[in-house]
Image (tube, grey):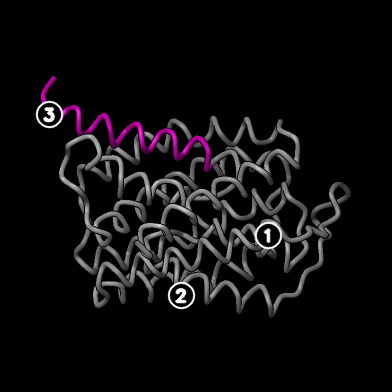
Amino acid sequence: MDLDIMWILVLFAIGFVGSLISGMVGIGGAIIKYPMLLYIPPALGFLAFTAQEVAAVSAIQVFFATLSGMFAYRKGGFINTKLVLFMGIPIVIGSFLGGYGSKFLPDSAINITYAVMALAAAVMMFLPKKGVEGGDYRKLTFNRRLASVSAVVVGILSGVVGAAGAFITVPIMLVLLKIPTRVAIASSLAITFISSIGTTAGKIMGGHMLWIPSVAMVIASIIASPIGAKAGKKMNIKALQWILASLITTTVIKIWFDILS
């Protein structure tokens, strides 16, 4: 098989697996696909991507993955409009600033930013969750100021690494804002979609976009993300939380091991 075709198939597989899981647990998938794109191609003998390139490909892939996953969740009534607005608007501003500003950072700074975010998310996933499951999700109350401030910070940091920040916004919703799990997952997809607009625009303006890998990842996302979202709606709440916690923790260990060694 032609090496170029094999390379595209590897990228498609990475996008498919990452988007399937991301649709299931309500994240854009960057926490899964960032290390996969960084490590799998060179392990199979292909040219390695730089951290800047991985961040750019992740950004556009997350845009389509969250869009597809959001449509799969919209019929269940789990997306809280107020939560999406109070976190979505601040996060898109921050993500644009971080996405464009990342052009001035070295690869090592991008990797460390990603590692710190993932570590914070991992710690929060093992803290007690106090959101009340069930009831009328449209009447949820939450700390609006805390939601907006945390969204700005997450937006800037996630824009740097080409993520939309869902792998840390979900733990923030569960632990700090006390949002029920399914509402956090569904609303996170909508917030992440908004965030990814700013991140993608910043990355394109920064000049780091690789279009062929991006298209392969996007096609995989459109197919796999809705499948994952449908599966996630049927899964046990605790199982979803543990899947997300396991993914984040595994990534944290790998990234920090590489940085420290």
The residue identified by callout 3 is 3
The residue depicted at 32 percent of the width and 33 percent of the height is 12
Depth order, front residue of 136/224: 224
Q: Does the magenta stretch include residue 60?
A: no
**Residue 167, how many percent across, how many down?**
55, 56
Q: Is mark 2 on a helix, strand or loop?
A: helix
Query: Type of residue at label 1?
Result: Thr
The residue identified by callout 2 is 94
Which quadrant would the C terminus be assigned to in this image? bottom left
Query: Type of residue at label 3?
Result: Leu
**Residue 23, how many percent across, how many down?**
55, 40
Asked if labels 1 and 2 touch by Cβ distance under 8 angstroms, the answer is no
What's drawn in magenta, residue-wise? 1-22
- Relative placement, left or right, of 104 versus 111 is left
10 Å neighbourhood of mark 2: few (<14), some, or many (≥20)? Answer: many
Badge nearest the viewer, 2 or 3: 3
The residue identified by callout 1 is 81
The residue depicted at 43 percent of the width and 70 percent of the height is 95
